[in-house]
Image (tube, rainbow, N blue to C red):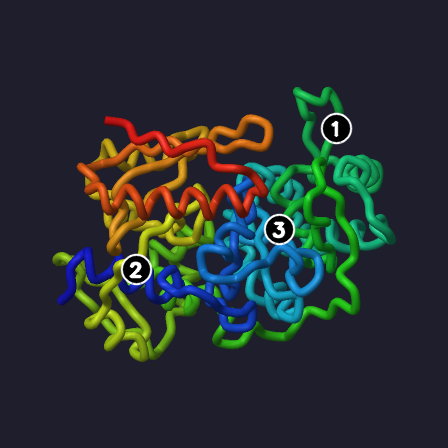
């Protein structure tokens, strides 16, 4: 039996948020992928774990559309195994992952996995060199039949549905060119999908290792997969753990680390940092009002992590080369804690190649 604070501290340690330095090879969040959304995305997530990835993105790191269709950073050497890891578990799983795009395909008698393969094959023929997403989408609209397509009101044209486009990209051996907007797709050099991801990149195992203890539903929600498919792939070495009265599971090898977990690290987590991606949100923020503040429908803030707990939110304001960090504490912060938060804000400003103009703490 463990409590919430032990779970939080275990995740801090498992995700290496308490270390000073590391390498891409030993950075565990790259097993699940570091989501690269917004200016404080994947590279900042790695910086918080002691890795300067500024020269690695596009070289030793590859940017792929994977889980939930979001862009994630991975080790380039893992690209083939990542493709195997994010392969849908079943046709039902594939249908769930592409949302409303599944309905017209099913009505036309087209299997969802088969549809993703068809889109991937077409994308592969189109993208022979760096190609802007809109150009790829326009070519696909000319090549694919009606069940694959939708009318886009904002653009006023016919497009491929968004999620099949994104999820087919890695199947086609395509990566995103870092720093491009709109996105530019290009072929992954010497890409070959692996037959299996292996234990380290297996998504169910990686979730339990980095965001456990967890239930099959937590993992399914993270992947947008059916719970049935996740249960069918539940690790045999997962053991039951009671967290504040709820039965969850953890890999047996991590039991001792959970029991002894402690953390004193202070970090400014980016809005989409893996630590905040856990699907047991009530564990991260038990107060519903705080949860609403942390995960609004639009415009997520970052979170202030201190001593193994979330103690507030933060938002950046950039003006020219100057950065201001506005902090909304959830409890009274001591002068010492405020100094440490300010040090982390200095770190963020340096990461953004900016000068810290100040840290504003709300009353």
Residue marked by disc 2: 215
Distance from the alpha carbon under mark 2 to that under mark 3: 25 Å
Q: Nearer the viewer, mark 1 or mark 3?
A: 3
Q: Are marks 1 and 3 in contact (CB under 8 Å)?
A: no
Residue 236 percent across, percent down from the top left: 35, 78
- In the picture, measured across the screen, residue 312 lies left or right of residue 72, that is left
Mark 2 is surrounded, within 10 Å at the Cα level, by few (under 14), some (14 to 19) or many (20 or more) other residues, namely many
Residue marked by disc 3: 65
Residue appearing at x 75%, y 44% in the figure: 184
* Residue nearest the viewer, comparing 281 with 87: 281
Residue 215 percent across, percent down from the top left: 30, 60
Q: Helix, strand, or loop for circle 3?
A: strand
Residue appearing at x 19%, y 37% in the figure: 331
Residue marked by disc 1: 158
Residue 13 seen by the camera: yes
Q: Earlier in the sequence, mark 2 or mark 1?
A: 1
Q: Nearer the viewer, mark 2 or mark 1?
A: 2
* Residue nearest the viewer, comparing 363 with 256: 363
Q: Earlier in the sequence, mark 2 or mark 3?
A: 3
Task: Work out whether 189 lies above or below 104.
Answer: below
Residue appearing at x 24%, y 46% in the figure: 336
């Amino acid at each position: 039996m463990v409590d919430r604070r032990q779970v939080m501290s275990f995740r801090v340690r498992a995700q290496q948020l308490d270390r000073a330095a590391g390498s891409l090879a030993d950075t565990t969040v790259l097993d699940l992928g570091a989501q690269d959304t917004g200016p404080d995305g994947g590279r900042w997530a790695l910086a918080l774990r002691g890795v300067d990835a500024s020269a690695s993105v596009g070289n030793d790191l590859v940017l792929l559309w994977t889980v939930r269709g979001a862009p994630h950073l991975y080790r380039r050497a893992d690209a083939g195994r990542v493709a195997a890891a994010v392969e849908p578990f079943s046709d039902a799983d594939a249908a769930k992952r592409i949302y409303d795009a599944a309905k017209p395909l099913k009505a036309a008698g087209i299997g969802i996995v088969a549809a993703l393969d068809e889109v991937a094959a077409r994308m592969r023929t189109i993208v022979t060199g760096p190609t802007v997403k809109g150009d790829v989408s326009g070519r696909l609209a000319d090549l694919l039949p009606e069940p694959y397509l939708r009318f886009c009101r904002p653009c006023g044209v016919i497009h491929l549905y968004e999620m099949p486009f994104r999820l087919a990209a890695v199947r086609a051996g395509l990566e995103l060119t870092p720093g491009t907007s709109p996105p530019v797709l290009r072929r992954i050099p010497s890409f070959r999908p692996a037959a299996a991801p292996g234990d380290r990149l297996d998504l169910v195992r990686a979730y339990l290792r980095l965001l456990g203890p967890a239930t099959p539903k937590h993992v399914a929600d993270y992947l947008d997969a059916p719970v049935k498919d996740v249960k069918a792939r539940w690790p045999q070495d997962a053991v039951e753990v009671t967290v504040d009265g709820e039965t969850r599971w953890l890999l047996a090898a991590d039991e001792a680390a959970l029991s002894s977990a402690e953390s004193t690290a202070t970090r400014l987590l980016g809005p989409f940092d893996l630590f905040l991606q856990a699907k047991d949100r009530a564990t991260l923020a038990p107060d519903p009002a705080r949860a609403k503040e942390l995960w609004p429908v639009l415009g997520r803030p970052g979170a202030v992590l201190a001593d193994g707990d979330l103690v507030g939110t933060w938002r950046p304001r950039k003006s020219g080369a100057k950065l201001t960090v506005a902090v909304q504490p959830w409890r009274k912060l001591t002068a010492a804690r405020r100094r440490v938060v300010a040090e982390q804000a200095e770190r963020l400003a340096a990461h953004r190649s900016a000068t810290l103009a100040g840290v504003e703490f709300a009353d």
